[in-house]
Image: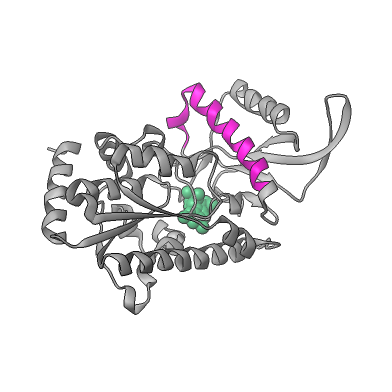
Amino acid sequence: TWTPGNIIEDQVAAIRSVVGDKQVICGLSGGVDSAVAAALVHKAVGDQLTCIFVDHGLLRAGEAEQVEKDYVAATGIRLKVVDASEQFLGHLAGVTDPEQKRKIIGREFIRTFEQAARELDAERHIEFLVQGTLYPDVVESGGGTGTANIKSHHNVGGLPDDLQFALIEPLRTLFKDEVRALGSALGLPEEMVQRHPFPGPGLAIRIIGAVDRERLDILRAADLIAREELAASGLDREVWQFPVVLLADVRSVGVQGDGRTYGHPVVLRPVSSEDAMTADWSRLPYDLIAKISNRITNEVREINRVVLDVTSKPPGTIEWE
Ligand code: XMP
């Protein structure tokens, strides 16, 4: 019978026999899949694993800290952090086209990961690379907007010749809910295990317009409020994803405090879905929407309007870019 305990036992034995006494690396993204895959491998081979976390500066509030502090505390994994936010934001400066943003982030991600892997390889010869590929990724690969395709920039299969590692994919036969169960059984932080899907390019594709630090901070503040209130309402599991989108080039007139303002709108985009291929807007209670709206306009000075996206997918995609 399927229990997290059985899977962990089987995988640990399998990983041990494949890896032997060789060295392994794994890239962490902040997401569930890589976190669970790495934790499994760590359970199997301990300190032969080193994780790399490229902080591109486009994560939500608290997420980098979750990886660097909570995850490391929970697992004892050796982590190499690369703070690359300066570099990513530099290359993204002035870029508004969504695909261009993705291209830049993908390119810089691979470049940065490669560099970090090269340094580690020089230190301790690396033979294996862990990837958090899930069963649906395996099945869908190659197809349209399927995950494997969309996540191409996270695929380090394109590493140069002198950095060819054998792949370890301990989650290849598993579905998302099974991976979450494994993560909990492995003692990973619950916020990480239950995290909604989040795009690799992060907040860069939730700022409509050019990306800069100030805009990222505004969006982070609004996004954190939406996440806090959703969690407090107990409806977290009803929602597949809850993007908050900053319309950074749009301004509208408002009245806040004792003056007229000319601020930005944010869009709330809570959706329900099975697999992200199709989706519907979540019918969240109006009181919850109202609470989020009030808090955002009260606490985030630059935002004076909150709107709700009531478009299904299709025709609208989940993200705005
Ligand atoms: P859309 O917006 O196409 O999104 O309905 C479908 C799912 O894919 C995620 N998404 C991405 N994930 N890199 C990613 O890793 C991307 O460039 C990207 N674009 C969209 C989105 O969050 C949703 O889960």
Looking at the image, residue 287 lies above or below residue 181 = above
Q: Residue at x 62, y 65 (%)?
A: 91
Between 140 and 299, the one lying in front of the other is: 299
> Residue most toward the right?
259
Question: In terms of secondary structure, what is the magenta stretch mainly?
Answer: helix
Q: Residue at x 37, y 76 (%)?
A: 160
Looking at the image, residue 74 lies above or below residue 40 = above
Residue 80 horizontal/vertical position (percent): 39, 54
Q: Residue at x 48, y 63 (%)?
A: 109
Looking at the image, residue 132 lies above or below residue 108 = above
Looking at the image, residue 136 lies above or below residue 234 = below
Q: Quadrant of the N terminus?
A: top left
> Residue most toward the front?
123
* Side of 248 relative to 116 (left or right): right
Report which quarter residue 289 is drawn in.
Answer: top right
Q: Which residues are magenta?
A: 215-239
Residue 12 visible in rendering: yes
Residue 40 horizontal/vertical position (percent): 23, 47
Between 231 and 114, the one lying in front of the other is: 114
Between 22 and 302, the one lying in front of the other is: 22
**Is the image coloured rainbow, by chain, by secondary structure, or in one colour?**
one colour
Residue 235 horizontal/vertical position (percent): 47, 26
Q: Residue at x 33, y 79 (%)?
A: 161
Residue 3 visible in rendering: no
Q: Quadrant of the C terminus?
A: bottom right
Residue 217 horizontal/vertical position (percent): 65, 43
Assess whether residue 225 is covered by the magenta stretch: yes
